[in-house]
Image: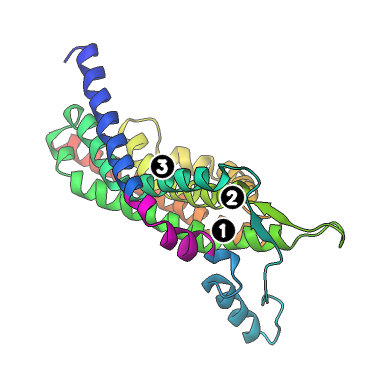
Amino acid sequence: MSFLDHLEVLRWTLIRSTLAVLLTAMIAFMMKGFIFEKIIFLPKSASFFTYRFLCKISQQFGTDGLCIDKIPFIVQSRTMAGQFSAHIWTSITAGFILAFPYILWEIWKFIRPGLYPKERKNAKSFIIISSFLFFVGILFGYYVITPLSINFLGTYRVADEVRSNIDLSSYIGLLRASVLSSGLIFEMPIIIYFLTKMGLVTPEFLRKYRKYALVLVLILAALITPPDIISQIIVAIPMIILYETSITISKIIIRREKKEKATT
């Protein structure tokens, strides 16, 4: 195929992916009550699963230090189109999350012609594993990063005279950033897989720069979580596990390639 033919294929890949996001976004748009009441605003409630879980752990050690009665702030909309705009963008975000496996399928179809026959057989595994990691990251962001951030930032006070009336866009923006960033971070093993296949990354390279990666992980954990050490450690642990898993994946790929070269 010529360069222009590749661009045409890419264009249709983007069009189909966009249509899939818009279709699922329309479904999410019609489920406004469920999405906002049962998903978006649930981490604001003291009865949220994460808060109750942390409270039980705290009580096991004979203290109520991690138990909360309420999160003292209200969510408000200060613009005429604020709620409608939040509804639209939340639906699009939900559409992207729900359509993510299909988007992966479209990406795979685009890169498949440039792969070997053995690699093309891994399409189902690629989509299933990538989607699984993405959704696990989404859940981690929703049940761990989001409540930790809301609890810390929502209860933080510089003075008793200051009341926290959080704008709707700010609240949803925090939740969206926490969830999507976590979902994409959990794709690290897949990214390392392709980088290794392309010869850009080796297990030795990942081991050599492990200490720098650890510093980067801690910095990233500090950016997406409240500025307290407990939250940063909770977020950093799975990221470190993902990095170590990526080293193992890279090692397996290099070993397989050496065996294939030895047999040919």
Where, quadrant-wise, is the N terminus in this rendering?
top left
Circles 1 and 2: CB distance less than 8 Å? Answer: yes
| Element class at badge 2 | helix
Residue 76 rendering spot, x and y as whole percentages: 64, 54
The residue wearing badge 2 is 174
Amino acid type at mark 2: Leu
* Mark 2 and mark 3: Cα distance apart in space: 35 Å
- Image quadrant for the C terminus? top left
Q: Using the image, determine if residue 40 lies above or below residue 212.
A: below
Whether residue 73 is visible, yes or no, is yes
Disc 3, SS: helix
Tell me how the rendering is colored: rainbow
Quick one: label 3, few (<14), some, or many (20+) residues within 10 Å? some
Q: State the extent of the magenta-drawn residues as a range.
A: 27-41
Image position, residue 217 (x, y; %): 57, 47
Name the residue: 29% across, 43% down: 23
- Tag 3: residue type? Pro
Viewer-proximal residue, 11 or 216? 11
Disc sitting over residue 146 in the figure: 1
Q: Position of residue 224 (x, y in %)?
A: 60, 49
If you read the primary sequence from the N terminus, does the residue marked by circle 3 or circle 1 appear first?
1
Q: Which of marks 2 and 3 is in front?
A: 2
- Residue 182: give its label: none
